[in-house]
Every structure is written in structure tokens, then in C-alpha cells.
Amino acid sequence: MTDTKTPPGPAAGSSKPARPRVHPVDEVLPVPKLAAYGFQHVLAFYAGAVLVPILVANALGLSNEQLIHLINADLFTCGLASLIQSIGFGRRWFRFGIKLPLLQGVTFTAVSPMIAIGLAVMNSGGSNVDGLLTIYGSVIVAGLFTILVAPFFARLLRFFPPVVTGSIILIIGVALIPVAAGDVTFGAIPGVNGSYIDPATGLQTFVYTDAAHIAGTSVAQYDYTLMNGGVLLTNFAYAFGTLAIILLIQRFFRGFLQTIAVLLGLVIGTLIAFALGAANFDSVATSPAVGLVLPFSFGIPQFSITAIISMIIVMLITMVETTGDAYATGEIVGKRIRPADIAAAIRADGLATVLGGIFNSFPYTAFAENVGLVRLTQVKSRWVVATAGLIMIVLGLIPKAGAIVSGIPHPVLGGAALALFAAVAVAGIQTLQKVDFSDHRNGIIIGTTLATSGLITAFGAVSAAFPEWAQIFFGSGITFGAITAIALNLLFFHTGGRGQAVAGRPGRTLVTLDQVNEMTQQQFDETFGDLVQDAPWLLERAFAERPFADAFALRAAFQDALLTASSEEQLLLLNSFPDLGSPDDTGHAYARDHSESGIGALNSEDIDDIADLATTYRERFGFPLVVCAREVERYEKVVDNGWAKMANSPVAERASALIEVSKIMNHRFDDKVADANPIASSHIGQATEVPAR
């Protein structure tokens, strides 16, 4: 008699079908948890969210009342944008919102271009409000442009490889440092549109550089002379004190407190300044308890073609950032990201940006800080971010909240901004780690981008030498640097009429797809041997698949040859890898990969642990432990996972090892082959770290 088991179903006598399992992303948590987790997202995001309107308002010389309105409008629109991205709406072919826990905020990429737009308008005789309206006009048009190009953007991603995106993110961080410096030196060094406190009278004198105000000032344009040493020393104490608080929190705390280190630094620094009489919150009492965020509060937007082009460049960069954040979030929450999802996320950015221009705010993108918070807490529900959006909308309708933020002393804000902007530069450096520096063209692109951006950042006055229509491009180091990076990438990698660029080897001429299809077996082996451990049978079978229609077909030829090989051939390939951590792997490409991933930084004890594992593994399975270095986070994990593998059967472990070999081949292919995978190339480093916003 056979005992037959049936799958579990509804309980006997129950007519209700079993409820389908809800993905964690779509899970609606209890209201108390939604509120707590949503507020945590707001706290992690708040400092970065309000910093952009503060920086723009300070640069344009807006009044305190105008600043409060900008902060409220920013929070209100951030809430709307987050609801659009997390909840989503529309049909499949024209959908807005990726429906993932992505919280939206104003992008830091736009800060310097927006300031340049506003100052250019003021230098041509307009008021600071005229500058603001020109910013809003360019924001609205750039948002509409983003909505229109969203479905086509995947085809453009190949023009934004890591050498371009990394260079741009790096110069964003570097070019924003002077903005932070302006807050640190506020009241002591006039600079551009700054002020100083006269040591004789104690009165604050504002210094403008625009044409409407220069006639009435006794201080020369672009005068960076120290005007009050006492104020500067006090400012340094507040700025570096705030920076020290942020660094200490990041060093000694973990989890939630670490994620809000910048916010805590601002709060503690401001409280100390208030106790010492250096912070003024009088506007809180005079601000209304409740206010409305109305469209076009400053007037009808004004439109400038150069400002619009500048903002479109910002949105192109933002699209790349959003693509990276979407893939990172999808990986964290376990959702596969398809091209239609990327288009929906970018459309949401565009719509939010249009709303930003209408409701007196700025361009929007996903905030990487909150992507990191999802990773940290493992709370994956998109409804948590939707709740955070509702909280921000409520805060945006409370002017007193904006008044509190506007009371933060400039030096305290400058100290926090130093931490944020430096972190942006580091994110750019991390992205540039994906670049092949053995190819001299990448070095030329990065070096020239840094040089041109640095020139404009250090000597912004050079823009005055150009016609008015060109001053937008030469007035911002970020804008000019971004144009340089994009143009040089097109020049070096996408022009020349030599066919599709495929493979390059250090010191040799770039190989095109046409040339690959015309290669002899020997030439093919010399070009691609290091891709497959110089396995002759694998190279022969890949070569036999010629002609290749494109780079994807070339990749598939190698993958198919690997996975359809006999067991003996596969075992031979596995044994061509040296033992991890062994002294005889020196000079091997596999060893270099692991060296770059940090194995060389381990102490001798850890190296011995890895060597013991590798020896035991080979004895158990008959081939070396193969690990894809590019995907190693910590070598402690490699050791733990390696010992856990000892329970596997030899057949199962061989399959696992072949997967690792396939990953290694894919990464080497991406290094060697231009445009091998444009989607992967757009995936900018985890911004779990603080990206350019």
C-alpha cells in the first residue's frame, strides 16, 4: 500500500481559498509600523532634502521668508514625488512609478547649474526672483523632456559608461565644496554674493556681484579678502565642530543613528550655537502654523534656451542615477528590474520635476541615502515610503517647520555640507574603480574633465568673457565638466567610422567587431585567451560561431561553449585556476582580481585561513575553490561560505564552481568589450553611499 501525500490546502470544511503570498514590497504593514518606519525614512532624508533650497536661496540672496517658502514647497513636492514613485499609476506602456521603496528628493546634481542660471540672470540686470523664475522654466521643460525620452533612454545608456558617470559625480562633489566654504566663511569673507560683518560697527554688509547691485557696493567684484578674522575663527569652530560630531556618530554608532548622523550634527550644532547666542529663531514665532503651497508663487516661469539645455544635461545624469538606484533597490528587495520598470521610474522623475517647477521647487530623483536604509533595515514595503511621502506633505504645509530649518547658522550648515559633498566625490571615485585605466583614453577623459571643471570652479569669473548665451555653460564647473566628459566619450569611443568597437588590449590598437569576424584562429586566441584561461577547446568553439552579429552574440558564444562542454573539459578548466591565497598564483589574472578586491590587505592569519580552506576544498572536490572576486564584499564571508560548501555533493559543487567561472568570464568580457552590456554599465556604485544629489 502506498502512502500518498497531498499538498497542503485549506482546512477541512473551509470554503475559503488559500491567500496568495504577498511580496514583501507590496506588503501593507500595520499603521504604527508604517508611521515609525516612514518617519525614519524622513529623518534619514530630511537634511539632504532641505539643503538644496537653502544653498540656492543663499547663493541668490533670497530673503528669509522666501527661503521658508522654498523649504515648504520642497518638502511638499518631495512627498508628491515619493507617492508617485512608490505607488505608481498609468497603463503598462505609459506607467509612472516603479512601485519600489524609492524615496524621491531634490538632486544635488542640479545645485551648481541652478545657481549658475540664477546668477547669470542677475548679472544681466535681472533680480534674484527673475533668476528663480528662469530656473523654474528650465526645470519644467527638462521634466517634460525626461517624460518623453524615458522609453528610449535604455538605448542611450551606452553613452554614459562609468568613465562618464564617475567623472561627473566626482566633479559634482568637488565643485560643491566652494558652496560649503561660502557658508563656513559667511560674514567674514565676502566672496560672491556674500556678506561680511564690519569689525568696527558690528553691522552686516551684503556684497553682490550682479549688475543691479555692484554700483552700490564699495567692495570689488569677486573680492575674497578676509574682512573679519574674529568672525572667521568663530565660524570655523562651529563648522568643524559640526563636522566632528557627524564623524564621531558615524564612527561610534551603528544602525539607525548612523544613518541620521548629518541630521544629528545639524541639530546638535544648532543647539550649541543657539545656547551661545549665534542662532536666531525669531521667524518661527511670526510664521503661520499652517500654510498652502500654491503653484507659481513667485510668478510665471521664464524660459532661456541655454538654461533649458543646462537642466536637460542635469536630467540625463539624473536618469543614469535613477537607473542605478532602481537596480540596487531591486536587488535588495528581490524584484527583477525590466526595461519597462526603468522607463516607469524615469517618467516618475520627469513628472515630479515638472511638479517641482510648478510648485516652486527643483528637479527630483531617487535618494540613495534611503536605498541604503532599505538595505540596512530590510524593511522592503513600498508603502513605508508612501507613508514617508504623506509625512513630508504634512510638513510642507507647516511653515513653522521651514522657519526652524532656515534658522540653522551658516557655519553649522557649511560643516554638514562639507561631509555631504565630500561623500558625493567619494561616490564618484567608487564608480571610477570600474574603469579600465590601462586604456589611456579613459585617463584622458577623466583628466580633461577634472581640469576643465576645476578651472571654472576655481575662477568662475571667466564666464564673463563669453557671450550671454554661453555663460550658462561656462558659469558652472559641473555643467562644463559634464559636457566635456560626454563629448570626449563620444569622440574617443563612438566616432572614427571603424565599425563597432569590441575589444582592446593594453598597448594595442582597439579591435572592432568587423576585425573579430575577419580574425584567424590564432589572432582570436591571442585576443580573447585571457577571457577563458587560455582553454583551447573553448576558444575553438567560440571562434566557430563566427560571424558575430554584435557583441551580445560574441558573449553568447563563450557562454554556450562553457556550459555545453563535457565534464572532463569543464574539470580541466576549473583546474586551470590557482588555489585562492596560494603563493604560486602570483601574476595570474585571477590573483590580480582578488588583489584589487582587498585580499592583499588581510593579515597573515586571515590569509592562512583562506589557504587552509582552499586546500581542504581541493581535497574534497578535486578542483580549486573558485570565487568571483568582483562580487566579494568581505573575505570573512568567503571563508564562512566555503566551509559551508563542504556539505555539498561533488556534482552540485561543480555546478556552483562553473557559475563562478561564468561570472568571472562575464566581468572580464565587460572589461574587454566596449558596449558589452549598456544596462550594467549604467549601474553606478551602491549608493547606499551618499550620491550626488
Image (cartoon, helix red, strand yellow):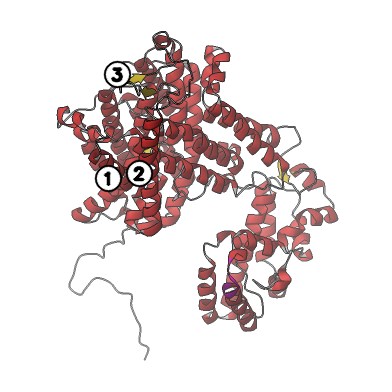
557 w.r.t. 497: above or below: below
Q: Which residue is mark 1?
A: 388
Magenta stretch, overall SS: helix
What's the CA distance linking mark 1 and mark 3?
A: 27 Å
The secondary structure type at the circle numbered 3 is: loop
Instruction: Determine the residue positioned at 63% across, 55% down.
Output: 667
Numbered badge on residue 103 = 2
What's the CA distance linking mark 3 and mark 2?
A: 27 Å
| Residue extending farthest front | 200
Q: Which residue is mark 3?
A: 298
Let me know if residue 605 is in the magenta part: yes
Quadrant position of residue 412: top left
**Residue 53 visible (yes or no):** yes
Verify CB contact (< 8 Å) between mark 2 and mark 1.
yes
Horizontal placement of 533 versus 315: left or right?
Answer: right
Q: Amino acid at mark 1?
A: Ala
Quadrant position of residue 360: top left
What's the CA distance linking mark 2 and mark 1?
A: 8 Å
Q: Position of residue 556 (x, y in %)?
A: 66, 55
Camera-side residue: 433 or 82? 433
Verify CB contact (< 8 Å) between mark 1 and mark 3.
no
Camera-side residue: 133 or 143? 133
